[in-house]
Image: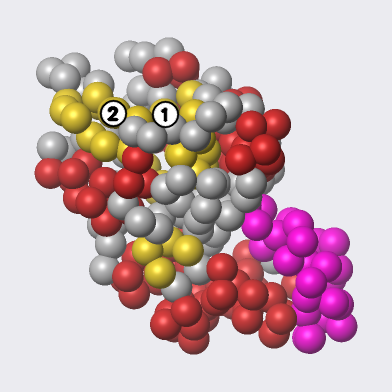
């Protein structure tokens, strides 16, 4: 979600500075390892009392409302989501954010809501564990029909790429928040600048999506 559909980096910096102040922890230390990981896992490192879903959902739900002006769309996100909806393709958002955070950003940005959503509180282990993507595949109903290798994941963080690969998926790495080298080391099958390079070409009668990857960066 963040770094693939919406770039909320500035908003999250402000959020973690606020939380860091409350915890008495240098926010730069938190920010160094927070991207692509669940807040509940980050908080567990510093204050186990705050590492619960009631608190995490509450504070994450505030982010789009308090810092909505600090977020921007990832280039190409709106057109890709609209094209998927136009042909009624099967797609999902699989994210380390909570439901209030995800739905808040989609509402603030006016972007398409997926029919299938996997959020932080849906799994016991966050990325880089593959649990979230395995659940996403299950919710899309793809296991019985297709091998996991035919499922395409789009990720921007090394933790996300590792999770997608561990779930047996092919992964496009977006060089929006991390370096090409970091995405390469994590195992991305392709690396592109942003979603302008991912274009829906059609939908087969069996529901298979045809995607063209343009201007891929050298692996």
- Pick the quarter of the image with the C terminus: top right
Dot 1 corresponds to which residue? 152
Q: Which residues are magenta?
A: 20-47
**Image point (43%, 61%), residue name:** 6
**Residue 20: x percent and y percent?**
78, 79
**Image point (67%, 62%), residue name:** 39
- Asked if the magenta segment contains residue 201, the reply would be no
Dot 2 corresponds to which residue? 211
Disc 1 residue crowd, few under 14, some 14–19, many 20+, Cα 10 Å: some
**Residue 147: x percent and y percent?**
43, 13
Q: Is residue 199 visible?
A: yes
Q: Is residue 172 visible?
A: no
**Image point (79%, 86%), residue name:** 21
In whole angstroms, how far apart are the C-alphas of marks 2 and 1? 9 Å
Above or below — where is 142 with respect to 102? above
Q: Magenta-highlighted stretch: main secondary structure? A: helix
């Amino acid at each position: 979600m963040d770094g693939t559909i919406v770039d909320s980096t500035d908003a999250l910096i402000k959020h973690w500075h606020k939380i860091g102040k409350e915890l008495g922890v240098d926010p730069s230390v938190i920010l160094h390892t927070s991207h692509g990981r669940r807040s509940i896992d980050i908080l567990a490192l510093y204050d186990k009392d705050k590492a619960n879903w009631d608190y995490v959902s509450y504070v994450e739900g505030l982010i789009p409302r308090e810092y909505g002006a600090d977020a921007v769309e990832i280039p190409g996100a709106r057109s890709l989501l609209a094209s998927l909806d136009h042909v009624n393709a099967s797609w999902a958002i699989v994210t380390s954010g909570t439901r209030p955070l995800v739905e808040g950003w989609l509402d603030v940005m006016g972007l398409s809501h997926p029919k299938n959503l996997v959020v932080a509180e849906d799994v016991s282990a966050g990325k880089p564990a593959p649990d979230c993507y395995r659940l996403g595949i299950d919710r899309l109903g793809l296991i019985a029909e297709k091998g996991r290798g035919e499922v395409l994941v789009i990720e921007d963080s090394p933790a996300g790429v590792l999770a997608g690969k561990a779930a047996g998926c092919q992964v496009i790495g977006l060089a929006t928040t991390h370096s090409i080298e970091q995405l390469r080391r994590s195992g991305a099958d392709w690396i592109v600048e942003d979603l302008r390079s991912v274009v829906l070409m059609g939908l087969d009668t069996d529901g298979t999506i045809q995607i063209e990857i343009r201007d891929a960066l050298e692996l």
